[in-house]
Structures are given as C-alpha cells and as structure tokens.
Image (tube, rainbow, N blue to C red):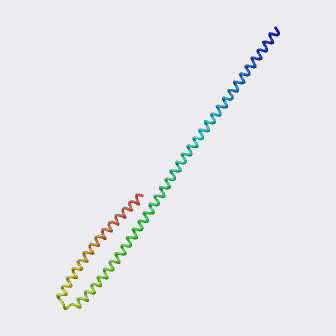
Amino acid sequence: AEQQRKKEEQKQKEEQAKLAEEQREKEERARLAEEQRQKDEQSRLAEEQRQKEEQAKLVEEERQKEEQAKLVEEQRQKEQARLAEEQRQKDEQSRLAEEQRQKEEQAKLAEEQRQRQKDEQSRLAEEQRQKEEQAKLVEEERQKEEQAKLVEEERQKEEQAKLVEEQRQKEQARLAEEQN
C-alpha cells in the first residue's frame, strides 16, 4: 500500500509538473502574442505618422507652388505696368515733338508769307505802271493763295484726324491701365 501511495504521489507530481509546463508555455505564447501585437501597433502608428508627414509635405509643396505662381503673376503685372508707363511716356514725347514740329512749320509758313508779301509789295511798286500785267499777276497770286488755303485745310483735316486717333489710343491705354 505504501508503494502504491508513493506511486500515486509520483504520478500526481508528474501531472502537476506537466500542467505547470503547459501553463508556462501558454503564458509564453500569450507574452509573445502580446509583443507581436505591440510591434504591429507600433508599425501601424509609425505608418500613420509617415503618411501624415507625407501628406503635410505634399500640402506644403502645393502651398509653395501657389505662392510661386502668385509671385510670378505679380511680377508679370508689374512688368506690364512698367511697359505701359514707358509707352505712355513715348506717346507723350511723340505728341510734344509733333506740337514742336507744327509750331516750327507754322513759323516757317508765316515767314514765307511775310516774305511773299514783301516780295509782292516790291513787285507791285515795281510794276505799278503795267496794269494789265498787274491784274494777271494778282489773279495768279489769288489762285496760289486759294491752293495754299486748300492744302492748309487738308493738312488741318489730317492733323485733326491724327489728334482724334491719338486721343482714342490714350483712352484705350487708360482703360487698359484701369483694367490692370
């Protein structure tokens, strides 16, 4: 009976040892599973962080592109305004030069007229006795003056048309400037 009891105790010890080993293996598996779960969680969080950083990088790149485009557009508008101002100044210089040319032309015509009158007076004084020739010369002079008047009227018409065109271009430039 003693031997049977010892045998039974030995069997129980072995059974307990087996159960303890199984429990240890179970705990080890659970520990390893928990470690793997934590690793997976860290990997997931790291991937989320990487994606967030990548998204932030893309957003920043887009913002920089938009800012660059804005700066380019501002530079283009500044250049356009500068060119428009240069053109305005050129037009103004052309207008002033044309006014000066017209003044000089008028002075020249006035001098020519004065000289013609002087010559005419001399001629009349010299040829006073030749009445028929005088009448002929007077008629020729009248025709010349009529022609000059027609030429002057035509020139004035052309000048007026030019001034109207310049005014239209100025108005167009002004509207373009306001548009800008």
State which quarter of the image contains the N terminus. Answer: top right
Residue at 40% across, 69% down = 92
Lateral position of residue 2 relative to residue 179, left or right: right
Residue 105 vs 28, above or below: the answer is below
Image location of residue 167, percent across then percent down: 34, 65
Residue situated in front as seen by the camera: 174 or 10: 10
Q: Quadrant of residue 11?
A: top right
Image location of residue 134, percent across then percent down: 19, 87
Residue at 36% across, 64% down = 169
Q: Quadrant of residue 176?
A: bottom left
Lateral position of residue 119 relative to residue 47, left or right: left
Residue 53 vs 141, above or below: the answer is above
Q: Quadrant of residue 170?
A: bottom left
Residue that lies at the very extreme toward the right in this rendered image: 2
Residue that lies at the very extreme toward the top in this rendered image: 1
Lateral position of residue 139 relative to residue 109, left or right: left
State which quarter of the image contains the C terminus. Answer: bottom left
Residue at 70% across, 25% down = 27
Residue at 36% across, 72% down = 98
Image location of residue 102, percent across then percent down: 34, 75
Image location of residue 147, percent across then percent down: 24, 77
